[in-house]
Every structure is written in structure tokens, then in C-alpha cells.
Image (cartoon, helix red, strand yellow):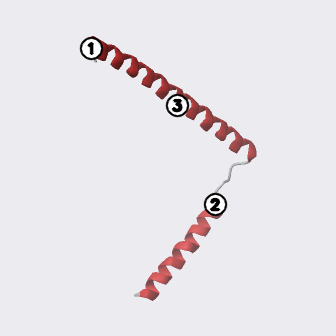
Amino acid sequence: MAIEKIREGRTFVEESWEELQKVTWPDYEQLKSATIVVIIFCALISAMIWAMDGVVRLVLDAVMGIFGA
């Protein structure tokens, strides 16, 4: 049973290595472009969340003001 698990593990590692040999890795320009896209996307999402937080805060302050809280 233990020997079978070792064989399965070895087979998995061998097959994984074969698949890694098929991978087309990005070059520097592709990597740089993708990184810039991710940074811009994160900045845009952060700005949207910040804006929505501000709007919710204004609405809650208005509602709380109406009820004197």
C-alpha cells in the first residue's frame, strides 16, 4: 500500500514535469504589460470602492440626521 502511494507520487511528479515542458512562458514585454494592467485594474477597483464608501457614508449621515442621531 505504501509502495503504491510512492509510485503514484512519482508518476504524478513525472507527468507534472512533462506538462511544465509544454508551457509557453511569457517574455519580459508580456509580463510587464500584464503587470501594468493588473496594477491599473487594482487602482480602479480601489477608487470605485472608495467612492461607493463615500456615497454610503453621506446617505447614512443624512438618514441619521433626519432621525436626530
What residue sits right under mark 2 in the picture?
22
Q: Tell me where residue 69 appears, x and y as whole percent.
A: 28, 18
Quick one: 58 or 39, which is closer to the camera? 58
Q: Mark 3, residues whose alpha carbon is within 10 Å: few (<14), some, or many (≥20)?
A: few
The mark closer to the camera, 1 or 2, is 1
Residue 11 - label: none
The mark closer to the camera, 1 or 3, is 1
Q: Give the structural element (helix, strand or loop) at label 3.
A: helix
What residue sits right under mark 1 in the picture?
68
Quarter of the image where one finds residue 29: top right
Residue at the far right in the pictured view: 28
Q: First in sequence: mark 1 or mark 3?
A: 3
Quick one: 28 or 22, which is closer to the camera? 28
Please tell me which residue is depicted at 59% across the width and 64% down the height of the picture.
Answer: 19
Q: Is residue 69 above or below residue 5?
A: above
What residue sits right under mark 3 in the picture?
46
Q: First in sequence: mark 2 or mark 3?
A: 2
Q: Give the structural element (helix, strand or loop) at label 2.
A: helix
Q: Quadrant of the N terminus?
A: bottom left
Which amino acid does the dot numbered 1 rest on? Gly
Q: Tell me where residue 60 appears, x and y as whole percent.
A: 34, 19
- Asked whether the beta carbons under mark 1 and mark 2 sit within 8 Å of each other, the answer is no
53 displayed left or right of 66: right
- Asked whether the beta carbons under mark 1 and mark 3 sit within 8 Å of each other, the answer is no
Q: Is residue 42 above or below residue 53?
A: below
Q: Is residue 14 above or below residue 25?
A: below
Q: Tell me where residue 18 appears, x and y as whole percent.
A: 61, 68
Q: Is residue 2 above or below residue 21?
A: below
- Asked whether the beta carbons under mark 2 and mark 3 sit within 8 Å of each other, the answer is no
Which amino acid does the dot numbered 2 rest on? Lys
Q: Tell me where residue 66 appears, x and y as whole percent.
A: 27, 11
